[in-house]
Image (cartoon, rainbow, N blue to C red):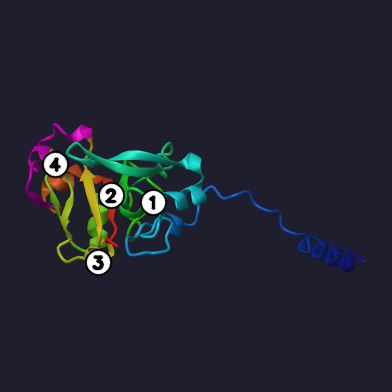
Amino acid sequence: MLALFTLTSCTGSSSRRPQSRPAEATDPPSEWQLDPADTSGTISSQSSEEALWLRFGKAEVDSARIELGEGETTPGTVIFPHDSLRRAEIVWQDTVRRSHPARVILRGSASRWRVGSGISLNTSLAELERLNGRPFTLAGFGWDYAGVVTSWNGGALDTTLAGIKLYLDPGPAQYESAPYSQVLGDRDYSSALPAMQQLSPRVRTIFIDFESR
């Protein structure tokens, strides 16, 4: 009888239909991957503002003017404008129909969006060197194109980050430091320089440039 009861109990419990889970707080990583060569991603070369409305809801998609640098702006779209972790800015090739992205911009200190091999806002200089397999070259700080990576020097990221620009910054706390003063201005510096290693800048802006149609 005991054996029969145990078998019946186990069978009953295993036949129960599992309870449905609430919507996951974290979407699959592929949903947050940005690749200018991908034609089927969350944001792809075929995207439009209307398609983003349908995907995310109109409350999460705003028409806006997007900063391009040097005081220049252009018509564009911001998705998740009130959520810094999901926010992305889109510049369109067709600014009338707001379709076919020319550039997607991520800014800030953290993001769920990813490029390449898990690179995002806040990725460190040391991590980029590890992924690249060697030191790379970036512009000096303190000007309009501060900290932009200008060459991966033939490393692995030359291929995986094609069409993608990363801008690094060490943060305001370092702006008066001696190492910072050694890597300023419109010239290139190696990531392997002792001053760069001490500053340990992190990715603060990412440009994803899509090919023209």
Q: What residue type is labelled 4?
A: Phe
| Res 73 quadrant in image | top left
Judging by the rendered image, the residue that carries numbered circle 4 is: 141
**Of label 2 and label 1, which has the lower sequence position?**
1
Judging by the rendered image, the residue that carries numbered circle 3 is: 159
Name the foreground residue: 189 vs 101.
101
Q: In the rendering, at what x and y percent does residue 146 appear?
A: 16, 43
Vertical relation: 81 (above or below) 135: above
Vertical relation: 201 (above or below) 115: above
Which class describes the residues within 10 Å of circle 3: few (<14), some (14-19), or many (20+)? Answer: few
Residue 201 visible from this viewpoint:
no
| Res 178 quadrant in image | top left
Q: Distance between the residues labelled 3 and 1?
A: 19 Å
Disc 4 vs disc 2: Cβ atoms closer than 8 Å? no
Name the mark nearer the viewer: 4 or 2: 2
**Of label 3 and label 4, which has the lower sequence position?**
4
**Of label 4 and label 2, which has the lower sequence position?**
4
SS state under label 3: helix
**Of label 2 and label 3, which has the lower sequence position?**
3
Quarter of the image that includes the C terminus? bottom left
Judging by the rendered image, the residue that carries numbered circle 2 is: 206
Position of 109 compared to 192: left or right?
right
Which class describes the residues within 10 Å of circle 1: few (<14), some (14-19), or many (20+)? Answer: many
Quarter of the image that includes the N terminus? bottom right
Give, as a single range, the part of the protein colored magenta.
172-190
Name the foreground residue: 149 vs 172.
149
Judging by the rendered image, the residue that carries numbered circle 1 is: 113
Q: Which amino acid does label 1 sit on?
A: Trp
SS state under label 2: strand
Position of 202 compared to 2: left or right?
left
SS state under label 4: loop
